[in-house]
């Protein structure tokens, strides 16, 4: 999330000053003279030298009405020519789309064919993606043009501050998935306004927040249908896959960056935020030398080097098919509060985020698994011989106790995923809803055991 800067809004005002009318009038001036003058010009001249004629002489200039009539005739003729060649342009667009493949192919149908009349009915919204050379556009261009209508900018104003973030449209009715810290403002409900990619300003209300996953859902106060983001499978990702991030860093909507997936099955600990505009403060990282602030939560994340900055929170992390694979949540920084991206960005996996968002829409709350054990990092225990999550104690009658797990065990895998510390285990347990079954691998007295555990409900 980024702080609102009212002075930055004025920089876009010159873009609205263009008007096609002056171009139409200017084309009328060089028009040929009247038919009588044309006949005269074709006859043999008996004058030894041309005589200067006033530009306002009737033989040269027929008045504003005649000029406008001739200009309109030229426009109609140009429209006929465009109609004859439209098939060529459509074919070219389809060829480019076919080369890029998938849903991204349709991204290049972005030409704005409009009337050349003096008045255009309706509201023309600004376009956020411009393609100057469609034949040379990249795959990233296609992904951005396809996904951009499903990404919104969110402005939040509350008693404890104001700020902005991003969101992803997940239903035609206008449900938007974002981060819980983007739309939090203490005890009072904040005033929320959404800006769509085509420039519409719409109000919105909070449907539900889930602090443990940092996922929230808001509902746009307007009838749809809205453009829904296509969702990919975040469990099928590989390190090195290309990624595209879309959001509003530092209040700059429609910003597109690209990179790769740097790591999967990563887990981070951040501080639960209660007010907007505190991404760099409350959303702190347990980095070497860092200090966590307030209550902390553990999140499973995708790590990417696509540039993510304050204000990208809640925005989309996409694959090369234009599908959502993650919800951008935070960045790591070495420069303290207010610093920008250093290539360490994190996104909540789409499978987890969408599961929570669906539960928020259906019931207003989300479910999370509970293991029933206190854990710490095995690397901090002198007697530990392997990295993992060291079991300090188990809750009598809890899930871990029923599965036979005891204090002193070191958990090394959960549902087949590696566990290197307490954050990994906590984050992966929270991904599953309460009541889920999972497999847990642990080391005890030099032996490795794998058991099935039924999680409780947090």
Image (cartoon, helix red, strand yellow):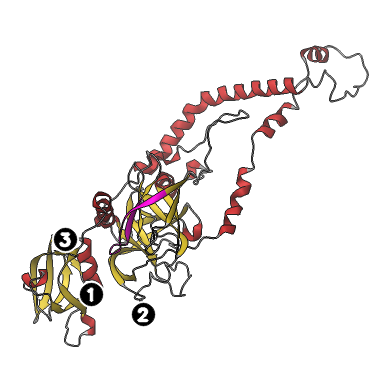
Label 2: how many residues lie within 10 Å, few (<14), some (14-19) or many (20+)? few
Residue 238 magenta: no
Tag 3 residue: 434
Q: Measure how far apart labels 2 and 1 are at the Cα level.
A: 16 Å
Q: Nearer the viewer, residue 123 or 130?
A: 123
Is residue 24 shown above or below 263? above
Question: Does residue 403 appear in this view?
Answer: no
Tag 1 residue: 422
Q: Nearer the viewer, residue 319 or 137?
A: 319
The stretch in magenta equals: 204-218
Is residue 197 shown above or below 22? below
**Label located before the other in sequence (2 or 3):** 2
Q: Residue 203, image x and y in percent? A: 43, 48
Does the magenta stretch mainly form a helix, a strand or a loop? strand
Q: Nearer the viewer, residue 418 or 376?
A: 376
Q: Check disc 3 and report its element: helix, strand or loop.
A: loop
Q: Check disc 2 and report its element: helix, strand or loop.
A: loop
Which mark is in front, 2 or 3?
3
Q: Residue 196, image x and y in percent? A: 45, 46
- Labelled pair 1, 3 in contact (Cβ < 8 Å): no
Q: Residue 254, image x and y in percent? A: 47, 51
Q: Check disc 1 and report its element: helix, strand or loop.
A: helix
Q: Residue 284, image x and y in percent? A: 38, 72
Label 1: how many residues lie within 10 Å, few (<14), some (14-19) or many (20+)? many
Label 3: how many residues lie within 10 Å, few (<14), some (14-19) or many (20+)? some
Q: Residue at position x 26%, y 55% from top?
A: 351
Dot label at residue 288: 2
């Amino acid at each position: 999330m980024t702080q609102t800067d009212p002075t930055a809004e004025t920089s876009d005002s010159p873009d609205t000053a263009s008007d096609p009318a002056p171009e139409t009038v200017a084309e009328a001036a060089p028009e040929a003279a009247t038919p009588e003058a044309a006949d005269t010009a074709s006859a043999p001249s008996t004058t030894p030298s041309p005589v200067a004629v006033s530009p306002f002489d009737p033989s040269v200039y027929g008045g504003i009405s005649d000029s406008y009539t001739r200009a309109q005739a030229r426009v109609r003729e140009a429209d006929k020519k465009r109609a004859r060649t439209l098939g060529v342009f459509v074919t070219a667009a389809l060829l480019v789309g076919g080369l890029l493949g998938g849903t991204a192919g349709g991204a290049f149908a972005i030409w704005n064919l409009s009337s050349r009349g003096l008045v255009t009915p309706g509201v023309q919204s600004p376009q956020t993606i411009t393609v100057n050379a469609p034949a040379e556009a990249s795959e990233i261009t296609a992904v951005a043009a396809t996904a951009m209508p499903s990404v919104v900018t969110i402005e939040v104003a509350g008693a404890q501050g104001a700020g902005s973030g991003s969101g992803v449209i997940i239903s035609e009715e206008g449900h938007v998935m974002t981060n819980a810290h983007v739309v939090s403002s203490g005890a009072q409900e904040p005033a929320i306004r959404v800006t769509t990619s085509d420039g519409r300003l719409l109000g919105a209300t909070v449907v539900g927040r889930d602090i443990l996953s940092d996922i929230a859902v808001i509902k746009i106060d307007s009838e749809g249908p809205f453009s829904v983001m296509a969702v990919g499978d975040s469990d099928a990702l590989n390190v090195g896959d290309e990624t595209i991030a879309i959001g509003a860093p530092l209040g700059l909507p429609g910003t597109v960056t690209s990179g790769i997936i740097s790591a999967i099955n990563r887990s981070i600990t951040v501080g639960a935020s209660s007010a907007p505009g505190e991404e760099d403060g409350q959303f702190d990282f347990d980095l070497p030398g860092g200090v966590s602030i307030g209550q902390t939560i553990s999140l499973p994340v995708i790590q990417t080097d696509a540039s993510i900055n304050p204000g990208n929170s809640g925005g989309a992390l996409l694959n090369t098919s234009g599908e959502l694979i993650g919800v951008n949540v935070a960045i790591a920084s070495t420069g303290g509060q207010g610093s920008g991206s250093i290539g360490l960005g994190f996104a909540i996996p789409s499978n987890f985020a969408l599961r929570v968002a669906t539960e928020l829409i259906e019931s207003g709350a989300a479910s999370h698994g509970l293991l029933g054990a206190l854990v710490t990092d095995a690397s901090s225990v002198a007697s530990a011989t392997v990295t993992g999550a060291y079991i300090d104690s188990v809750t009598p009658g809890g899930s871990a106790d029923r599965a036979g797990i005891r204090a002193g065990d070191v958990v090394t895998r959960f549902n087949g995923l590696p566990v290197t510390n307490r954050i990994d285990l906590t984050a992966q347990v929270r991904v599953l809803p309460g009541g889920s079954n999972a497999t847990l691998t642990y080391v005890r007295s030099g032996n490795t055991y794998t058991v099935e555990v039924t999680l409780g409900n947090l």
